[in-house]
Amino acid sequence: MKKVALITGSSRGIGAAAARALAGEGYAVCINYLEQKEKAEALVKELREMGSTAIAWQADVSDSLAVREMVAHAKKELGSITLLVNNAGVAGQIQFQDITPEAWARMFAVNLGGCFHTTQAVLPDMLHAHEGCIINVSSIWGQHGASCEVAYSCTKHAIIGLTRSLAAELAPTGIRVNCVAPGVIDTDMVQVLGQDTLTQLAQEIPLGRLGRPEEIAQTIVHLASATYTTGQVFAVDGGFIL
Ligand code: NAP
């Protein structure tokens, strides 16, 4: 069966690293982005030069119709999606009492709603094939509380609930659902914290440094081929929380 991966939020950061790693494993990949078209197209060019098959598609994962169009386009260009990596996400540091209802709703719409829309869109073909793999990207803040990141932490906890419940529901169909929970990974997302905070955080991490996007991609590649693993959450955090 042809291996086809859709990686949401893969124009940069962890998603881009996952797309590179999966292309290296022989997957045809659909790169998804929200705004950074040039980065997505540069990645497609890079992967094609490596001999891989890749396309890019703009879609806001919070928009179910846009997601369905993306999945239909990917199917037409690459074939049915056999691996879905729900990676697109947004974060934000703010005290709980200052979160507006709109910001709360947007965080849930992207981080959790995105997983819902993409998964519903790819499932019919996976159910038909009696196989498929879904990997959700949560966070260590989906396993532990995070001061000033309550909305983000709630969405990431929910992604773990989604992973476990959907894994139980889909296991009889042959479809596996797993989750990666990254620690502090050196991407654009954490740059808002500032260099001083990042240096301090690195000192608090037992392995003594931030993680690299490629190190999350390693676990995504592992889970893609871990045929007897479902419903699991893998922390990849340098031992940050033990
Ligand atoms: P990042 O560098 O900020 O990249 C975010 C990616 O998501 C970009 O490709 C962005 O597209 C895309 N995106 C954002 N909103 C989107 C939307 N509504 N629809 C479609 N795509 C959207 O983030 P990252 O650090 O790689 O994080 C990736 C995932 O890992 C997220 O779910 C994040 O919560 C999780 N995570 C990250 C860390 C960390 O320390 N970095 C830790 C734990 C968990 P554009 O480029 O077009 O804007």
Image (cartoon, rainbow, N blue to C red):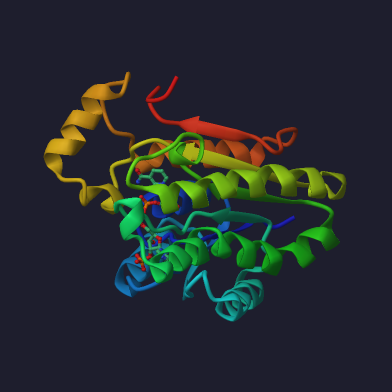
Q: Residue at x 53, y 40 (%)?
A: 180
Q: Residue at x 58, y 74 (%)?
A: 67
Picture coordinates of residue 107, whole percent (x, y): 44, 62
The C terminus, quarter of image: top left
Residue 6 found in image quarter: bottom right
For ligand 1, give the image quadrant.
Answer: bottom left
The N terminus, quarter of image: bottom right
Residue extending farthest front = 97
Which of 89/143 is in front?
Answer: 143
Residue extending farthest left = 196
Total marks shown come to: 0
Picture coordinates of residue 10, whole percent (x, y): 43, 59
**Rendered view: 63 above or below 40:** below
Picture coordinates of residue 153, whole percent (x, y): 45, 46
Which of 74/211 is in front?
Answer: 211
Q: Residue at x 43, y 51 (%)?
A: 152
Can residue 80 be seen here? The reply is: no
Residue 141 found in image quarter: top left
Which of 214/230 is in front?
Answer: 230
Which of 46/164 is in front?
Answer: 164
Picture coordinates of residue 28, whole percent (x, y): 57, 60
Can residue 167 be seen here? The reply is: yes
Residue extending farthest right = 172
**Rendered view: 124 above or below 195:** below
Image side of residue 107 versus residue 208, left or right = right
Q: Residue at x 77, y 65 (%)?
A: 125
